Amino acid sequence: MNMQSKLVQFDMKTGLSPDVKSIQRKLSQMQGMYADEGARSLMEAADDVLVYEFHDMHLPEQAGDIAFGTSITYPGKVGHEYFMTKGHFHTILDTAEVYHCLRGNGYLLMENPEGDWEARELKAGVSVYVPGRYAHRSVNISDDEPFITFFAFRADAGHDYGAIESKGFRKLIIEQNGRPAIVDNPKWK
Amino acid sequence: MNMQSKLVQFDMKTGLSPDVKSIQRKLSQMQGMYADEGARSLMEAADDVLVYEFHDMHLPEQAGDIAFGTSITYPGKVGHEYFMTKGHFHTILDTAEVYHCLRGNGYLLMENPEGDWEARELKAGVSVYVPGRYAHRSVNISDDEPFITFFAFRADAGHDYGAIESKGFRKLIIEQNGRPAIVDNPKWK
């Protein structure tokens, strides 16, 4: 098959594309993802807000192709824990990903099956290279701005959400004395 | 080897990184690349200006890794032809690349060995997916602004500059009546 090039516009302010529908995750789709499930449940009942959204270009999932798009995590907290994406491993575990921050302020939280973890802070203009074997999650630490990144990875890498959904990440990023703090996840198994 | 994550800053205005030295290409390194070699040679003698620069993170060149960085093509013309990068095929021909425009206005000019070509116009916030098999070149069509893109591709893809250096691209992007025009390359073999 002879693929053709593809042009995709993204709004500089919102990160959203007028060309491609985003995939949205609301509070109701984040059951059990936050340390304080009670707080999440109460929030959801009051207003099932959008936590994050991202784009899937539906490119062929071939080893030579690159999947890309923007990820937008909204400002907010569940209890003391900042709004974040579910996070995932790649199904082909040893495939990397790169995130370039377009707007806002947040963290990429990463961990591998061997127990290593890393947290890198992003602001507009900063890239983070996520090496293979590392699950990764975006966390918005701003009070009022969306955390917007442009991401790219091998199109056949695949997403494994299961491990994170059942175990969580080893670390949480929470607000402590008005600042972000990285603490142990008491629920981590 | 257990790779670690990597954080790289890029200046939002210039596209340059304080963390990684860029690779620079001046007019003197663009011999024979423009349609009007006489004009290029005269310009070089007067002032051997920088045409473009880009970053190489020197990540391991493995199939699971992603190479990334910014590319900055400066405004200018050689005769009527806009400043541009040399352009390249990937050595592993069937590997894609994605470019996300951070600033400025330009084109990605693409062609494959089968004779298909495409030209896509980028502005800040626009991504272009370059499919496998397509040589690609950045062209700055602005009078006064650098054309800055964030790029990502499979780290083992490799760069084949030879074919383009000897044959050129089938098409040129030139200024005609004050506007960009895509025309046949009279020197193309």
Image (tube, coloured by chain):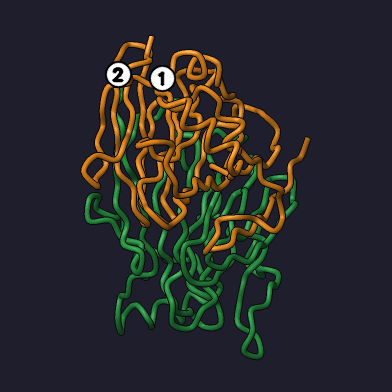
Chain colours: A green, B orange
Q: Is residue A166 visible?
A: yes
In the image, A36 versus B19, the foreground residue is: B19
Q: Is residue A38 above or below residue A167?
A: below
In the picture, residue A28 is in which quadrant? Answer: bottom left
Q: Are marks 1 and 2 on the same chain?
A: no
Residue B17 placement (x, y as % from top left) = 65, 55
Say few, some or many: other residues with alpha carbon within 10 Å of mark 2 (under 14 / 14 to 19 / 20 or more). Answer: few
| Residue that carries the numbered disc 2 in the rendered image | A2
In the picture, residue B83 is in which quadrant? Answer: top left
Q: In which quadrant will I find the C terminus of chain B?
A: top left
The answer to whether mark 1 and mark 2 are in CB contact below 8 A is yes
Element assignment for label 1 = loop
In the picture, residue B49 is in which quadrant? Answer: top right
Q: Compute the Cα span from label 1 to label 2.
A: 9 Å
In the image, B62 versus B173, the foreground residue is: B173
Residue B56 placement (x, y as % from top left) = 65, 40
| Residue that carries the numbered disc 1 in the rendered image | B133
In the picture as drawn, the residue positioned furthest to the right comes out as: B1
Residue A114 placement (x, y as % from top left) = 74, 45
- Tell me what residue is drawn at x 24 percent, y 53 percent: A21
